[in-house]
């Protein structure tokens, strides 16, 4: 089994904290490593977590994304704990193209439970892999931007960067 690795990287929306195992991202946020550790299993928490200045393939893809190659993050592998609906919602979010926005209702439909609009919102809130699982592309049904765990200003920046907003 590959070692857990952590790194930080600068981005236009702030410092990104990243936790990986091999080529798979287990967590990416803007709030720090404590939040990343909170999503690990007790067994994973017992493992040594190595530090790296760069995680080949993953940090490169993120840098490319922020430099304008919006598809660069699409091939990054991800894994996070969550129930069946959350997993379906996160998978559905990754299918929303950069530059597009969908409502929580659209996400619930895509995830296979059209009536589960609140659960779709909850999946966005529980998402531990910011940017790569693009919960920032989910907005309210009336077109309002809605919440974002790392600040609405960062959500707006990401949507503008992707061309979804002027």
Image (tube, helix red, strand yellow):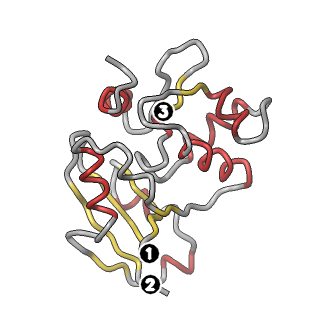
Query: Vertical placement of 64 versus 161: above or below?
Result: below
Q: How crowded is the residue under tag 2: few (<14 C-alpha within 10 Å), some, or many (20+)?
A: few
Image marks 2 and 1: residues in contact by CB distance under 8 Å: yes
User: Which residue corresponds to the image point at 20% horizontal and 70% vertical from the top-left?
Assistant: 53
Query: Vertical placement of 43 versus 39: above or below?
Result: below
User: Which residue corresponds to the image point at 24% horizontal and 53% vertical from the top-left?
Assistant: 63
**Label located before the other in sequence (2 or 3):** 2
Query: Vertical placement of 122 versus 62: above or below?
Result: above
**Label located before the other in sequence (2 or 1):** 2
Label for residue 130?
Answer: none
Image marks 2 and 3: residues in contact by CB distance under 8 Å: no
Identify which residue, 102 or 16, lies in the foreground. 102
Quick one: SS at disc 1?
strand
Name the quarter where the C terminus is drawn: top left
Q: CA distance from mark 2 to mark 1?
A: 6 Å
User: Which residue corresponds to the image point at 30% horizontal and 53% vertical from the top-left?
Assistant: 62
For disc 3, the marked residue is: 137
Seen as rendered, the residue at the extreme top is: 142
Could you say where residue 110 lies in the image, as x and y percent from the top left? 69, 37
Q: How crowded is the residue under tag 3: few (<14 C-alpha within 10 Å), some, or many (20+)?
A: many
The number of numbered discs placed on residues in the rendered structure image is 3
Could you say where residue 165 lies in the image, as x and y percent from the top left? 36, 20
Could you say where residue 51 lies in the image, as x and y percent from the top left? 27, 75
Could you say where residue 14 lies in the image, as x and y percent from the top left? 24, 44
Q: CA distance from mark 3 to mark 1?
A: 26 Å
Query: Vertical placement of 11 versus 113: above or below?
Result: below
Label for residue 2?
Answer: 2
Q: How crowded is the residue under tag 1: few (<14 C-alpha within 10 Å), some, or many (20+)?
A: some
Quick one: SS at disc 2?
loop
Quick one: SS at disc 3?
helix
For disc 1, the marked residue is: 21
């Amino acid at each position: 089994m590959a070692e857990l690795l952590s790194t930080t990287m600068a981005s236009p929306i702030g410092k990104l904290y990243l936790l990986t195992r091999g080529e798979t991202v287990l967590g990416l946020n803007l709030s720090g490593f404590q939040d990343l550790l909170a999503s690990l299993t007790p067994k994973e928490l017992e493992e040594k977590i190595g530090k790296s200045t760069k995680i080949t393939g993953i940090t490169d893809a993120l840098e490319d994304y922020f430099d304008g190659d919006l598809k660069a993050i699409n091939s990054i592998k991800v894994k996070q704990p969550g129930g069946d609906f959350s997993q379906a919602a996160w998978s559905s979010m990754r299918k929303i193209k950069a530059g597009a926005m969908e409502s929580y209702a659209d996400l619930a439909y895509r995830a296979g439970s059209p009536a589960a609009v609140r659960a779709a919102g909850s999946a966005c809130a529980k998402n531990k892999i910011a940017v790569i699982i693009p919960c920032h592309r989910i907005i309210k049904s009336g077109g309002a931007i809605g919440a974002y765990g790392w600040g609405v200003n960062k959500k707006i920046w990401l949507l503008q960067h992707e061309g979804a907003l002027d």
